[in-house]
Amino acid sequence: MNERVDDEIDVNGLDWAKGDGLVPAIVQHAATGEVLMLGYINREALAATRATGCVTFWSRSRRRLWKKGETSGHVLALRSIRADCDGDTLLVQAVPRGPTCHLGTTSCFGDAVVPPLGFLAELDALVARRHAERPAGSYTTRLFESGTRRIAQKVGEEGVETALAGVAQDDAALLGEAADLVYHLSVLLRARGLSLAEVARVLAQRHAAAARDSA
């Protein structure tokens, strides 16, 4: 729970009166953008969320504070919290420690609501865990233990195979080779202490700069 939290909420600026002391809180996966659940927060629940780093709601049925995962252990680790333009709804970004839904799915809206590119964040996180834990029998573990030079060589090989598939093979082959390339690139970045998320930030910065230049 020691990740940096982005929290710019002005408690007194929220419209608590509109919902009789409650504001709806949409919880979004901080990495993938997946909508995880909807809950309700009062002043006390907001204070508990900030103090513990675990998303806490006000249970309307039990009439008490409810820390998500208090019995299952599947807590929501807070990453950011923001209010909407009217100050009557919160957007909470969090990292789920296990399924969010009591039915065992990541989201209370089912497992079909992950944004199309959201899995890249899951892949990035999985590669990071493999780098830290080095489980036996894992191909990713073997790659890390082979060293950065060998990983870079694999990226080069996959890049050539992707290029060849692009000019000489069908769409399925190209997609398969591209998937291999992205995976091995993720491993190479992690071996250097970097991530796909940082690559995405560079692309976003370039896009913003290009937009400014063309304005």
Image (tube, rainbow, N blue to C red):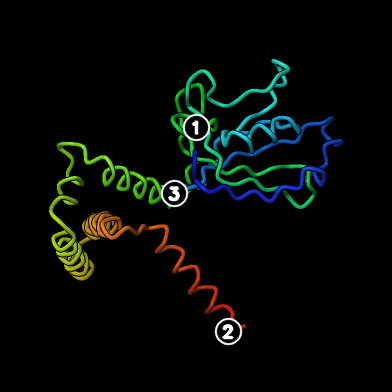
Residue 12 drawn at (x, y percent): 82, 43
| Residue hosting label 2 | 214
What distance separates the C-alpha of mark 3 from that of mark 1?
15 Å
Quadrant of res 214 = bottom right
Q: Amino acid at mark 2?
A: Ser
Image-based side of 157 in relation to 117, left or right: left
Question: Viewer-proximal residue, 40 or 132?
Answer: 132
Residue on which the image places disc 3: 118
Q: Nearer the viewer, mark 3 or mark 1?
A: 3
Going by the numbered disc 1, the residue's amino acid type is: Gly
Instruction: Confirm or deny contact between disc 3 and disc 1 (CB under 8 A).
Output: no
Report x, y in % for residue 168: 17, 68
Query: In the image, which disc is placed on residue 39?
Result: none
Q: Residue at x 49, y 67 (%)?
A: 204
CA–CA distance in space, label 3 to label 2: 29 Å
Q: Quadrant of residue 26?
A: top right
Which residue position is annotated with label 1? 110
Q: CA distance from mark 1 to mark 2?
A: 41 Å
Could you tell me residue 133's position as x and y percent?
26, 40
**Disc 3 or 2, which lies upstream in sequence?**
3
Residue 67 in the image: x percent, y percent? 60, 25
Residue 85 appears in the picture as rendered:
yes
Report if the CB atoms under discs 3 and 2 are less than 8 Å apart.
no
